[in-house]
Structure formats: C-alpha cells, structure tokens
C-alpha cells in the first residue's frame, strides 16, 4: 500500500520544520522488492504483476540459454524441474528483477564492496541512493534534498541519517550480512527532493520497527483492558492489595494464637483451683488422715504389718489344731489378737476409701470449674 506522508505525519514520526511530501511504502506481505523500488523512485511505479512479468521474462531467457546445449540434455531437464530463481509465491524478487526494472529508468546497480567500485574511492555521501538486501528483504537508503533517509518498509516511518553517520550505517549493514548496491543514474524528480533542497528537517524520535510498535500497542490495550476490568469490579467497597491481604492474614493468625494461649492459661488456672479445692475437701472430710499426715511409704508399712499379723494368726491356728487340749485358751487369744488386726484392717480400708473419695471429689471439682468458666 502506497503512503504519502505530509508534514503533520512527519511530525508524528519525530520530524519538524518544513512542508514537503515524502512518499514511502510500508511492508505488505513479502513484497519488499516492490516497496524498495517505489520508495527509491518516490512513486507507485511498479506493481507485483509488473515485477512478475519481468521475472517470467528472465526465466524464459535462462531457459533458452539452457536449451542451446540440447533440450534432451540432463542439465536442461534438471533446469525445467527446478523452481524459478527470480521470484516465488511469497512475493520475493531477485536482484536481476530489480536491476531490469531500474533499467527502464536508465538506472544501474553496482555492488558497493566490489573491487571496481572501491577503486573509485567515492565517499558515500556523494552518491544519491543505495539498495540494501539481506536474504529476502530489500530496502532503500536515499538522499532527498541535502539529507539522507532510511526508507525501510519495516519501519513505522522514514529514519533520518546524518552525513557523518552514513558511512558507519553502511558498514554496520555489511557486518550484519547485507549486500549493498549503489544506484547510478538520474532519479526521477519528486516533490520531497525539491522541498528538501531548500529546508532541513530534524528528527526528535527515531521510528520503531512495525512489529515493535504493534507489540507496544497490544500491551497498552491489554493494560487498559485490565485497568478497566479492575475499575469495573470495584463497587465502592474497596479492594485490598496483596500487602494489605497479607497483613490481614497475619493479624488473624496472631489473634488465633492469643486465643489459644488464653485458653491454655485458663485451663491451668482451673486445674490449680481444683487441686486447691480437692485438698481443702480432703482435709475437711478426712480429719484423721490430715492429722496423721500419712504418706504412701507409711501406708505401705502399715499394710506390711497387717499382713505379718495375719500370717502370725494363721500359724497360731495351725498350732491349736496340732494341740486339742489347749483349744480354749488359743481361741481367746485368737479372738483377742484378731481384734487388733481387724481394727487395723478397718483403719486401712477406710484410708483407701478416703483416698478414692478424694480423687473423685478432685475430678468433680475440675469438671464443675470448667463448666463455670464455659458459662462465663
């Protein structure tokens, strides 16, 4: 698509000062050779159909030369089976097609780094235009008025190149693998060249690659869409950012830990109170135990004494069975002696009952205290 850029558009691309027309074609598909020629001539002079016609003409000339060796030769049959070297379905055209197209205007292409041209020692700023090629991409570098411009169809607009930077720019292209051709001959007149003979322009911002600009515009649209979605989702209740949400979660966890610590402290206090209550109940309900302050060791000794007395009593009964004449007296002693052990058994059992009752009362006190705290 052919684009005529006025001063207003040039200002958008970073140009200022002057009122001129600068014709550039932006990339469409792979027709960069067509854009390169039209940007060079500053007009829509060539179409894909016209360039395809030139390519077919070149293919026919090559076929006729191959046929001179015989149409039945192996080389000729191989040539016919191969695709065209002057064009393809993607829109690519060879240097031969571009060179033949420029011959219509009396223009000639010379390889920039060829020995013939290098012997001339011509300063690049004294030339009028260059055509650059890398693989399947073509673009033009042309002097309009007194300034140089990079008219690459992959850029969003023309790029201003200073005289001092031109030689470095061409050398950089050669290092990147570009083939550079010098355009010899008089280019057709154009309005941009005439106006730029009288004025000079300054470029404030260099143009970007079309792909970079599209990616930037896409990112901006995505960011705008996300922002609109966020604003639409905000119903006035407020939205917490990630930091605020993390703070809220930390405060909630802290409150849970404090509650757990308080519950544990309350439980410990309840157990202490219940133990104190059980101690008081045991001192009130079993005065004998509290007065004597019996320990577990003392209780164990008293049980051992009780069992010893029982063994002694059994031995006496066995002796009485062995001596029948003395039955009455041992019986009296058995009755008398059995009274003391009986009283000791009663005392021992009562103490055990009191201990069990104390434990039961302690558990009841704990349960009652917990219920009271729960109601609070």
Image (cartoon, helix red, strand yellow):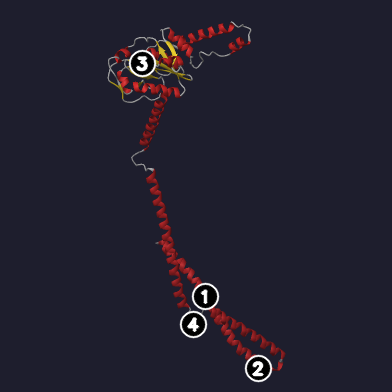
State which quadrant residue 334 falls in.
bottom right
- Between marks 2 and 4 in the image, the one whose residue lies nearer the viewer: 4
Q: Earlier in the sequence, mark 1 or mark 3?
A: 3
Q: Secondary structure at mark 4?
A: helix
- Picture coordinates of residue 304, whole percent (x, y): 59, 81
- Circle 1 is placed at which residue position? 355
- Between marks 1 and 4 in the image, the one whose residue lies nearer the viewer: 4
Residue 1 visible = no
Circles 2 and 3: CB atoms closer than 8 Å? no
- Between marks 2 and 3 in the image, the one whose residue lies nearer the viewer: 3
Q: Is residue 327 left or right of residue 282?
A: right
- Picture coordinates of residue 206, whole percent (x, y): 35, 25
Q: Secondary structure at mark 3?
A: helix
- Circle 4 is placed at which residue position? 292
- Circle 3 is placed at which residue position? 126
Label 2 to label 1: alpha-carbon separation: 39 Å
Please give the name of the residue rendered at 56% of the width and 79% of the height, measured from the top-left corner: 300
Disc 4: CA contacts within 10 A as few (<14), some (14-19) or many (>=20): few
Report the front residue among 332 and 60: 60
Circles 2 and 1: CB atoms closer than 8 Å? no
Disc 3: CA contacts within 10 A as few (<14), some (14-19) or many (>=20): few
Mark sitting on residue 329: 2
State which quadrant residue 350 falls in.
bottom right
């Amino acid at each position: 698509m052919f684009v005529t850029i006025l001063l207003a558009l040039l200002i958008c691309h970073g140009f200022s000062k002057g009122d001129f027309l600068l014709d550039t074609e932006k990339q469409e598909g792979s027709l960069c050779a067509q854009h390169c020629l039209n940007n060079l001539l500053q007009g829509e002079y060539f179409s894909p159909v016209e360039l395809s016609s030139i390519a077919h003409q070149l293919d026919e000339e090559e076929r006729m030369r191959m046929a001179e060796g015989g149409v039945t030769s192996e080389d000729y049959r191989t040539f016919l089976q191969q695709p065209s070297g002057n064009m393809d379905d993607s829109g690519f055209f060879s240097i031969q097609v571009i060179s033949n197209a420029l011959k219509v205007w009396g223009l000639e292409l010379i390889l920039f780094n060829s020995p013939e041209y290098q012997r001339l020692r011509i300063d690049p700023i004294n030339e009028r235009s260059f055509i650059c090629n890398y693989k399947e991409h073509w673009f033009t570098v042309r002097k309009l008025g007194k300034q140089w411009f990079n008219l690459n169809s992959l850029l969003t607009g023309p790029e201003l190149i200073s005289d001092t930077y031109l030689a470095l720019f061409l050398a950089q292209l050669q290092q990147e693998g570009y083939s550079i051709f010098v355009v010899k001959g008089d280019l057709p007149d154009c309005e941009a060249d005439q106006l730029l003979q009288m004025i000079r322009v300054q470029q404030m911002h260099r143009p970007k690659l079309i792909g970079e600009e599209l990616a930037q515009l896409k990112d901006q649209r995505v960011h705008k869409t996300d922002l609109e979605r966020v604003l639409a989702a905000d119903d006035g209740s407020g939205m917490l950012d990630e930091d605020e949400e993390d703070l809220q979660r930390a405060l909630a966890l802290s409150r849970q830990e404090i509650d757990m610590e308080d519950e544990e402290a309350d439980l410990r206090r309840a157990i202490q109170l219940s133990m104190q209550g059980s101690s008081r109940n045991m001192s009130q309900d079993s005065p004998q135990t509290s007065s004597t302050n019996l320990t577990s060791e003392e209780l164990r000794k008293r049980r051992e004494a009780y069992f010893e007395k029982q063994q002694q009593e059994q031995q006496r009964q066995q002796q009485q069975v062995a001596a029948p004449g003395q039955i009455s007296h041992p019986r009296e002693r058995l009755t008398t002696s059995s009274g003391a052990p009986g009283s000791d058994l009663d005392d021992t059992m009562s103490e055990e009952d009191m201990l069990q009752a104390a434990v039961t009362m302690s558990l009841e006190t704990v349960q009652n205290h917990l219920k009271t705290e729960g109601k609070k």
